[in-house]
Amino acid sequence: MTVVYAVILGLTAGILSGMFGVGGGILFVPTLSLVVGLSHLSAEATSLAAIIPVVAVGAWQQDRYGNVRWRPALVIGVSSAGGVAGGVALATWLSEGVLERLFACLLLVVAARLAWSARR
Amino acid sequence: MSRTRPVVALPAIGLSAGFFSALFGVGGGVIVVPLLVLLLGYSTRWATGTSLAAIGLTSLFGMAAYGALGEVSWPDAALVGFPAMFGTFFGTWAQQKVPTRVLTILFSILLAAVAVRLFIG
C-alpha cells in the first residue's frame, strides 16, 4: 500500500511543484518521512535522489526556452560541492528532532512567501 | 544598482546553495533564484532556468554523499521521483490554464499545516 501512496504523492508533488514553482524537495521530504515512514535524515537524503529526474526534465524544458545560462550554472553547481559537505556534516550531527523542526521552519518561510506572492 | 562580480558571486551562491540543499534535502532553488536576481541582476526567467541546471549538480553531490553514508532509500527515491517527473509536466501546463491565486493560498496553508505537524511530531 505504501508503494501506491508513494507513487500518488510523488505525482502530486510534481504537479504542485510545477504549478507553484516550488522545488520538489520541499514536498518530497514530508512525503517520505510522514507517509513512507523514513527517518527525517533518510527522507532528506532520499529526497535529493528523487529531485534529480525532476530537475533534469525542468532544466531541459527551460533550456528549450533559452533560459539556462550554462557556464554560470556549472560554476554554481561545481562549487556547491563544498557547501554540500558542510550541510551533510551538520545534518548528520544534529538530532532528528532538531532537524525536523528546522525543516518545519523552512516550510513556514516558503508558505509565507507563497501567500505573500498571492496578495493583491 | 551595483552588482557583485560573477567571479565572486557564483562560487558564493554555489557554496551557500550546497549547504542549504544538503541540510534540508531540497534542491536549493529557494536560495539560488533570489541570489542570482539580487547579486547578478538576472531576470526571474534566467534565474529559474540557470538555478534548475545548477541544482542538478548540487542534488547529485548531496545524493552521492548521503548514499555513501547509507541514508538514501533508492526504491523510495524512484517511487517518488519518477511519478513527480511526469507530474511536473502537467503542473507546468496547468499553471498556464487555471487561475492560481486561490490555489496558491490553499497550498501555502497546506505547507503551514505540514510544518505544524512536524513541530508536534
Image (cartoon, coloured by chain):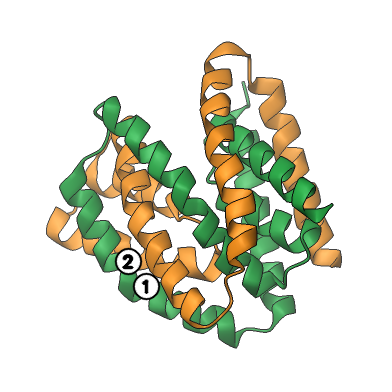
Chain colours: A green, B orange
Judge by depth and name the residue closer to the eye, A2 or A112. A2
Q: What's the CA distance linking mark 2 and mark 1?
A: 5 Å
Residue that mark 1 sits on? A83
Crowd class of label 2 (few under 14; some 14 to 19; many from 20; radius 10 Å): many
The answer to whether B19 appears left or right of B97 in the picture is left
> In this image, A6 relative to B98: left or right?
right
- At mark 2, the secondary structure is helix
Q: Which mark is residue A55?
A: none
Q: Which residue is mark 2?
A: A80
The image position of residue A99, as x and y in percent, is: 66, 74
The N terminus of chain B - image quarter: top left
Residue under disc 2 on the same chain as residue under disc 1: yes
Identify residue type, mark 2: Ser
Q: Residue at x 41, y 37 (%)?
A: A58
Q: Could you tell whether B6 is left or right of B105 in the image?
A: left
**What residue is rendered at 23% in x and 46% in y?**
B40
Q: Chain of mark 1?
A: A
Label 2–label 1 contact, CB within 8 A: yes
Q: Is residue A89 visible?
A: yes
Task: Give the structural element (helix, strand or loop) at label 1.
Answer: helix
Image coords of residue A117 (percent x, y)? 57, 31
In the rendered image, the vertical position of residue B19 relative to residue B115, given as above or below: below
Density class for disc 1 (Cα within 10 Å; few <14, some 14-19, many ≥20) is: many
